Every structure is written in structure tokens, then in C-alpha cells.
Image (spheres, grey):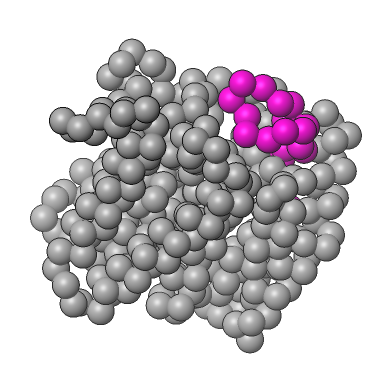
């Protein structure tokens, strides 16, 4: 039965909904043109994440009722409010909505979900403080997922890794995780290099919103550090880049080319090479997250931070930038 949760959404997205989304995006003029920030060489339809939304939402709602999943009210609220997040992303792909409006919709949607969410972080802080902390963290995850959707298959891969982890080790959300995984794999068929379809804001914000909600729903079962470990390739890179640029006086929502995948591309790496390197890094982080689940090794999260810090230093070295007290001679 679990295999059907992957196969059915995969086939629906890969064979029907992704091609339909591409047609619809072209019809509406939702096409990413080549510019100074883009990493593609020809115009590509944007908004293909619509296919993931159209397949995932009804199938996930059906799974909730068929299997009577735990935290049912929370999961229903999650799927319902995810449509508002997806709609704003869809409109933004067409009209470039203001950042304040998009953020407001994200915060309201998250707040509705948190009303139905169980207490997660324990009793060491008041419930209202926990809700505020999760609200801000969830909103940040949604937006960093959007920021990181910048090269072929990159965000799709991250989503698949998270879904596999949730589906294999957290039965309460396994059906929904499998459905998202299958739908994203179907989309990846069109999003892998050379991409013929981009997911756009509708896809990246929807996936970020859903994945954060699923991780929260099972955070009462195990330490949240295992989930944080699994997302470090995105969270560490995006958070560091945005904070650094903000301190330099840049607006955090203004597009730029300072993320790792941008810098790797500027160094001459192809989309395929970036995807494969991310695959290797995510495999290492996945293994470390498993160590966290097993209860062995108290410092695995710190080791992962060190591992990714070495990767960041390697990128700086290849760029010829100062590396502490060392500077590469070009």
C-alpha cells in the first residue's frame, strides 16, 4: 500500500499535471526569462509547482480520513491553509506581489495551524512563547525554501530527502510524506537538468509550508535536532547568506546570487554537477539524522555544522577569497 502512495502521485504529476501546468503557465505568460540572476539559458515556464499542489492536497486529505492519522485536526488545518499559501505563490509568480502581503498570508496560515497543534517543545517555556517561536521558525523555513529554489532539481531533491525520512521513520505522517515524495519525484522528471519546468513560488512555498508542518507534527515523538540536521544544506546556507547581506544593508527579500548554488555555478559547475554534489551532502546529513534518531552520538549535529562549514570554506577558496589568514594566489 505504501508503494501506491508514491506511484500514483508520481504518475499523475509526471504524465498529466506537470505537462498541463507547463501549458497553463505558457498560456498565462508565466515564463522565466534569462537575466543577470538566472542560471538557465532559455525561457522556462514558471509555476509548475501547481501540479504538486493539485495532486498532493486531495490525496493527502483522503489519506487522513482513510487511516485516521494522529493529530487529525492539525493535519486538516495544515492542508487547508496550504492552499492559501499556494494561491499567494501562484499570484506572485504572475504579478510579483509585495513581500509584506506574502508574509502576512504565511503568518496567518501558520497561526491557524498552531491553534490546532499540540505542545511540542516541552514544559520549559510557556505555551504562548513556544507558539511564537514556532511561528517565526516556520515562516522562515517557508521563505528559505523559496529562496533556495534556484537551480534545476535542487529544491525538489531536498523535499524528497525530507519526505523519505519522515515516511520511513514516522508512521503517523507516512502516508502524507509518501504522497508528497511521489508528487515531487514526478515533478523532478520535468525539473531535472535541463529543466523544462520550474516550480515557482507556488511550489517552493507550498512544499516549505507542508514539510515544516509535518516535521512539527512528529516533533513530539523525537528530538527536533534530527530534522534540523536533515535540512542543514538549505537552512545553514540561506540563513547565513541572508543575515550577512542584511548586516551589509541589503533588503533580505531582494534577489541576489550569493547562495552556494549560485556561487558554484559561477565557478563553472553545471546544474547536473551541483545536483549531484547536493545529493552527496544530503546523503551524509540523512545518515547523521539517523544517528540522532538512534540515540547514539550526542555531538552529531555539531559535526554536521563543521562538515558544512568546510564546504563553505572550500567554495571561498575556489573563488579566491580570503580564507582566514590564507589567501589563494590566482
| Residue depicted at x 68% and y 50% | 193
**Residue 278 within the magenta-colored segment of the rendering:** no
Tell me: 146 left or right of 185: left
Q: Which percent across, then down, holds residue 4? A: 68, 80
- Which of 285 and 29 lies nearest the eye of the viewer? 285
- Judge by depth and name the residue closer to the eye, 229 or 141: 229
Q: Which quadrant of the structure image shows residue 66?
A: bottom right
Question: Which residue is located at x 27 percent, y 55 percent?
Answer: 307
Q: Main secondary structure of the magenta part?
A: loop
Q: Is residue 189 above or below residue 241?
A: below
Q: Position of residue 321 (x, y in %)?
A: 32, 28
Question: Magenta span has 45?
Answer: yes
Residue drawn 37% across the image and 27% down it? 330
Is residue 288 positioned above or below 159 on the image?
below
Residue 288 makes an appearance in the image: yes
Residue 54 visible to an observer of this rendering:
no
Up-down: is 166 above or below 326?
below
Q: Residue furthest top?
A: 249
Which residue is rendered at x = 72% and y = 59% of the image? 189
* 167, 236: nearer the viewer: 236
* Quadrant the N terminus occupies: bottom right
Q: Position of residue 3 (x, y in %)?
A: 64, 82
Q: Which residues are magenta?
A: 32-52
Q: Is residue 176 above or below residue 27?
A: below
Amino acid at each position: 500500500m505504501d508503494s501506491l502512495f508514491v506511484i500514483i502521485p508520481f504518475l499523475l504529476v509526471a504524465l498529466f499535471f506537470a505537462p498541463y501546468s507547463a501549458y497553463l503557465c505558457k498560456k498565462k505568460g508565466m515564463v522565466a526569462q534569462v537575466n543577470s540572476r538566472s542560471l538557465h539559458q532559455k525561457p522556462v515556464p514558471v509555476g509548475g509547482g501547481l501540479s504538486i499542489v493539485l495532486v498532493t492536497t486531495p490525496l493527502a486529505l483522503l489519506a487522513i480520513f482513510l487511516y485516521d492519522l494522529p493529530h487529525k485536526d492539525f493535519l486538516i488545518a495544515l492542508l487547508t491553509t496550504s492552499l492559501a499559501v499556494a494561491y499567494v505563490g501562484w499570484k506572485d509568480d504572475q504579478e510579483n506581489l509585495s513581500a509584506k502581503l506574502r508574509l502576512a498570508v504565511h503568518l496567518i496560515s501558520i497561526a491557524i495551524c498552531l491553534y490546532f497543534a499540540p505542545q511540542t517543545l516541552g514544559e520549559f517555556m510557556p505555551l504562548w512563547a513556544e507558539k511564537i517561536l514556532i511561528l517565526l521558525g516556520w515562516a522562515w523555513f517557508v521563505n528559505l525554501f523559496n529562496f533556495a529554489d534556484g537551480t534545476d532539481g535542487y529544491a525538489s531533491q531536498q523535499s524528497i530527502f525530507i519526505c523519505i525520512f519522515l515516511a520511513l521513520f514516522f508512521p503517523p505522517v507516512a502516508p502524507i510524506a509518501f504522497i508528497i515524495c511521489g508528487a515531487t519525484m514526478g515533478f523532478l522528471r520535468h525539473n531535472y537538468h535541463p529543466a523544462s519546468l520550474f516550480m515557482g513560488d507556488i511550489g517552493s512555498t507550498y512544499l516549505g509550508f507542508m514539510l515544516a508542518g509535518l516535521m512539527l507534527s512528529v516533533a513530539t515523538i523525537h528530538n527536533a535536532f534530527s530534522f534540523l540536521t536533515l535540512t542543514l544544506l538549505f537552512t545553514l546556507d540561506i540563513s547565513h547568506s541572508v543575515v550577512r547581506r542584511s548586516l551589509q544593508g541589503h533588503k533580505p527579500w531582494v534577489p541576489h546570487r550569493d547562495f552556494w548554488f549560485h556561487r558554484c555555478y559561477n565557478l563553472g559547475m553545471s546544474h547536473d554537477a551541483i545536483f549531484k554534489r547536493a545529493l552527496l551532502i544530503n546523503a551524509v546529513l540523512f545518515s547523521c539524522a539517523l544517528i540522532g534518531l538512534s540515540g547514539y552520538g550526542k555531538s552529531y549535529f555539531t559535526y554536521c555544522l563543521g562538515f558544512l562549514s568546510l564546504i563553505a570554506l572550500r567554495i571561498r577558496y575556489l573563488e579566491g577569497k580570503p580564507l582566514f589568514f590564507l589567501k589563494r594566489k590566482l
